[in-house]
Amino acid sequence: MTERQAVILGAGMAGMACARILSRRGIDALLVAPPSDVASRGETLSFRAGPYLETLGWHGLLDAETALVNQGSYSVWGNRALRRGMFHQEEMSGWHIDRYRLEARMAETLEADGVDRVFCEARQFSRSETGIAVELADGSPVNTRLLVDCSGRSAVTAGPAVTLRRLDKLVACYSVFTLDEDVEAIPVTLVEAVAIGWWYTSLLPGSRMLVGLFTDSDLLPAGFRKNAGLWADLASQTTAISPRLSSLGMDLAAAPELHFAAASALDPLAANGLATALWSGIQAAESVVGLLTQNDGTKAVQYQQQFLQGIASHLAVQTAMYASEHRFTDAPFWQRRRGPWLEN
Ligand SMILES: Cc1cc2nc3c(=O)[nH]c(=O)nc-3n(C[C@H](O)[C@H](O)[C@H](O)COP(=O)(O)OP(=O)(O)OC[C@H]3O[C@@H](n4cnc5c(N)ncnc54)[C@H](O)[C@@H]3O)c2cc1C
């Protein structure tokens, strides 16, 4: 059986951030993660990610191939008017990123760092005399002093000891369009509330645009997953999204392949997921360093407290955002989001 000081599960931004710090601190860590299954899609990386990217030496990865500077956000939320900004809150600045490309570039830096990675899933976990025994999908066993679960919403180590609580069934149904060469689109975020959920568009590097509907999986109209026409019909009924797409010469009826993705642990509406993942990976790594090199759990306890506070404040912001939409009072999507989220 292979022996490691630490095993990190998952190579999303949290897992890669954790691996980067541990490798710099000389910890013998193994990154266990299948190849990325993220389609080349656009997400908004909050300005809050800036300092974490600096810490990780990754700021330079935000270039013309991976990111566009967000020039503002607009929303149709609360009433039918289009307005600048979102939810009466601070301007959502940051970057429009191609998450697949950015994560691929991060993975390259880990390779250059010499981070050890196996490209498969971890399947089973059990206590061992010296730590935790992990069984990989290829059947090989690894024993580790500490295990860092960065598997995101999958939360693969949740089991009898930790209860997994799903707060929503949010799913993204999205398509990525390629714009004509002569079209100059301004990189802004546009969000529009509708009875079934909300629409989101963002520009990607390489003259592409992501158009997505976020709703609950059980609210999708019958046949929706197999019929992109239904998706296009809903999009064409929007107040601001549809005219913007038409102005950019995009034909919704000719949508390229429709993708479905279960949304993440943090509702993407707040666009905090990626920045939080980077923060969390760094904090987890510092906790591991404290425990392994000084037998000191102070950092780990602090991280746990900050993490729980972060979840509480995220849910408060999320509730306020949804509460600022006063229409659709009879629609299940909106009724479910009135909170409180963590009642019992
Ligand atoms: C459609 C969509 C749009 C979004 N838009 C935004 C946005 O605009 N802005 C924003 O900030 N956030 C957005 N998010 C959220 C953001 O993508 C997540 O918060 C972020 O990716 C979380 O990072 P992570 O590293 O914690 O987890 P993930 O990125 O989910 O990575 C988890 C990794 O764990 C791996 N894994 C799973 N099981 C195992 C196992 N058994 N063994 C080993 N590895 C395993 C997976 O393969 C995966 O690579 C969006 C999410 C979705 C789905």
Image (spheres, rainbow, N blue to C red):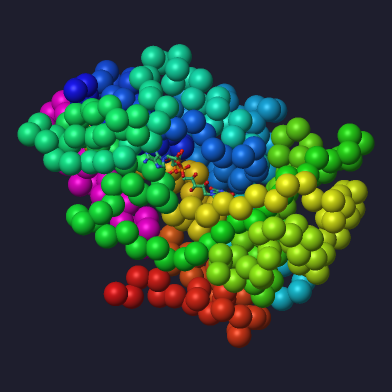
Q: Is residue 295 magenta?
A: yes
The answer to whether 51 appears left or right of 187 in the picture is left
The quarter holding residue 64 reads top right
- The answer to whether residue 56 is above or below residue 337 is above
Magenta range is 292-312
Q: Please name the residue shown 61% across and 80% down the image.
A: 331
Q: Nearer the viewer, residue 150 or 296?
A: 150
Provide residue 60's location: percent of width, then percent of height.
57, 24
In the picture, residue 180 is in which quadrant? top right
Q: Position of residue 69 (x, y in %)?
A: 68, 38
Q: Position of residue 241 (x, y in %)?
A: 78, 60
Q: Is residue 57 above or below residue 152?
A: above
- Residue occupying the point 57% across, 74% down: 333
| Magenta stretch: dominant secondary structure | helix
Examine the rendered structure and indicate whether residue 331 appears above or below residue 12: below
Q: Tell me, yes or no, whether the highlighted magenta stretch contains residue 56.
A: no
